[in-house]
């Protein structure tokens, strides 16, 4: 399974699907390579850029808003909305740092409008000084919106009952989610129960992992029950909902891409959950090769000559004996340095 770019479908609102683990290390080159792969599968919030392909229906089959061009692979970016239609007024001119949209959602918890749940959570949780008042928005509980153009507060809908403007070119009423940026290719996954980005045609929902993953992971990922319904082992943020890119390590455990990168930056190549190596075999082999060289170039003092230690490999679980060295001990079976003394 190496090299495969993976990606768990990110949820625009919640986000990212997971990707296959990047390589790290020695890095940067490898890591960069791996990270590039990741980007193929899932882009994140603020960079809904290109590489998107076609078909607008991928962005919301359940609820097609007004852009339903349908048809044969229409280029999403180019489907130009009819400017004379009042529903198309103000496209991309309204919204917050997170989304371009033309309605604010009314948070039922505080009875106040916010552009999006991230804006709400920033104000009411992250930046709330009183710990007792901190709370996050339940997107399913949202019932009302405020039109961004005319200011009318109303039941949530696809368009304003006052001025007729559409609240988003992509709309999901289940998630109370609106987005004028179609290049993100939002779609609602029934099984995840949330909207994700990256195009429905690029993902499948794994029922074991219980999350959307990139198609490239269909036959190559290690399934772990509810693996995306876990906290990042580095920063502890809940992953299923995270809007940051997520990677799936070869062991099947999930982690933020940036958190994985920080492990590699600190020359840590083991999964914090299970201790297996964090990159695929070919990427790790390059790390072990450089370890071989380092070991060779660092002879141990003569008093250690011939000393051997018993080790257990975290990757292949084989026990073996290896020459003692301060830099590490190489598994006699698979060649990994991800071993511990026993
Ligand atoms: Zn926002
Ligand atoms: Zn309005
Ligand atoms: Zn949705
Ligand atoms: Zn899903
Ligand atoms: Zn799975
Ligand atoms: Zn993290
Ligand atoms: Zn693991
Ligand atoms: Zn081994």
Image (cartoon, grey):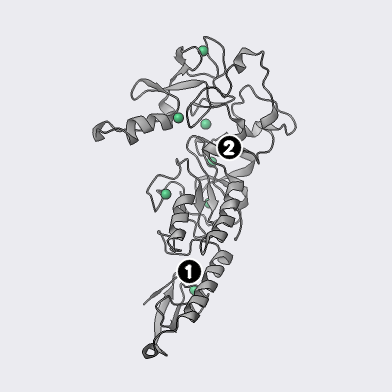
Residue 109, given in percent of the width and then of the height, sits at 34, 25
Left or right of 216 in this view: 300: left
Compare residues 297 and 43 and report the one nearer the observer.
297
Residue 193, given in percent of the width and then of the height, sits at 49, 35
Quadrant assignment, res 1: bottom right
Compare residues 94 and 61 and report the one nearer the observer.
94
Residue lying at the far front of the rendered structure: 297
Residue located at (55% from left, 62% from top): 280
Compare residues 200 and 291 and report the one nearer the observer.
291
Compare residues 205 and 96 and report the one nearer the observer.
96
Q: Nearer the viewer, mark 2 or mark 1?
A: 2
Residue 137 is at least partly visible in this image: no
The kind of secondary structure element at disc 2 is loop
For mark 1, does the 10 Å Cα neighbourhood hold few (<14), some (14 to 19), or many (20 or more) residues?
Answer: many
Q: Is mark 1 within 8 Å of ligand 8?
A: yes
Compared to residue 166, the image places residue 211 above or below, namely below
Q: CA distance from mark 2 to mark 1?
A: 37 Å
Residue 313 is at least partly visible in this image: yes
Q: Earlier in the sequence, mark 2 or mark 1?
A: 2
The kind of secondary structure element at disc 1 is loop
Which residue does the numbered mark 2 point to in the structure image?
A: 48
Q: Are marks 2 and 1 in contact (CB under 8 Å)?
A: no
Residue located at (56% from left, 69% from top): 286
Q: Quadrant of ligand 1?
A: top left
Residue lying at the far top of the rendered structure: 162
Residue located at (36% from left, 90% from top): 303
Q: Which mark is residue 315?
A: 1
Residue 179, given in percent of the width and then of the height, sits at 55, 28
Compared to residue 331, the image places residue 236 above or below, namely above
Compared to residue 35, the image places residue 244 above or below, namely above
Residue 194, given in percent of the width and then of the height, sits at 50, 35
């Amino acid at each position: 399974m190496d090299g495969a770019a993976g990606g768990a479908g990110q949820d625009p609102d919640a986000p990212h699907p997971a990707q296959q683990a990047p390589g790290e290390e020695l890095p940067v080159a490898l890591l960069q390579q791996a990270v590039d792969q990741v980007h193929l599968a899932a882009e994140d919030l603020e960079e809904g850029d290109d590489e998107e392909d076609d078909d607008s229906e991928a962005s919301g089959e359940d609820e097609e808003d007004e852009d339903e061009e349908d048809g044969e692979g229409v280029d999403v970016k180019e489907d130009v909305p009819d400017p004379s239609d009042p529903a198309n007024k103000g496209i991309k001119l309204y919204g917050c740092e997170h989304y371009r949209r033309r309605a604010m959602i009314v948070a039922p918890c505080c009875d106040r409008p916010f552009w999006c749940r991230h804006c709400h959570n920033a104000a009411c949780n992250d930046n709330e000084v009183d710990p007792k008042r901190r709370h996050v928005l339940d997107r399913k509980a949202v019932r009302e919106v405020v039109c961004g153009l005319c200011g009318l507060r109303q039941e949530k809908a696809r368009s304003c009952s006052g001025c007729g403007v559409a609240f988003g070119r992509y709309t999901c009423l289940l998630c109370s989610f609106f987005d004028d940026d179609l290049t993100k290719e939002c779609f609602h996954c029934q099984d995840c129960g949330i909207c994700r980005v990256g195009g429905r045609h690029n993902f499948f929902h794994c029922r074991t992992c219980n999350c959307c993953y990139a198609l490239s992971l269909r036959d190559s990922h290690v399934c772990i029950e509810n693996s995306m319904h876990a906290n990042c082992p580095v920063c502890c943020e809940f992953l299923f909902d995270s809007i940051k890119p997520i990677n799936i390590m070869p062991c099947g455990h999930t982690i933020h891409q940036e958190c994985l990168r920080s492990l590699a930056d600190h020359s840590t190549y083991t999964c914090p959950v299970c201790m297996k190596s964090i990159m695929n075999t070919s990427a790790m082999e390059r790390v072990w090769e450089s370890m071989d060289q380092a070991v060779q170039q660092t002879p141990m003092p003569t008093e250690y000559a011939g000393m051997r230690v018993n080790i257990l490999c975290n990757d292949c679980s084989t026990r073996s004996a290896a020459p003692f060295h301060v830099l590490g001990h190489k598994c006699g079976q698979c060649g990994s340095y991800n071993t511990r003394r026993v």
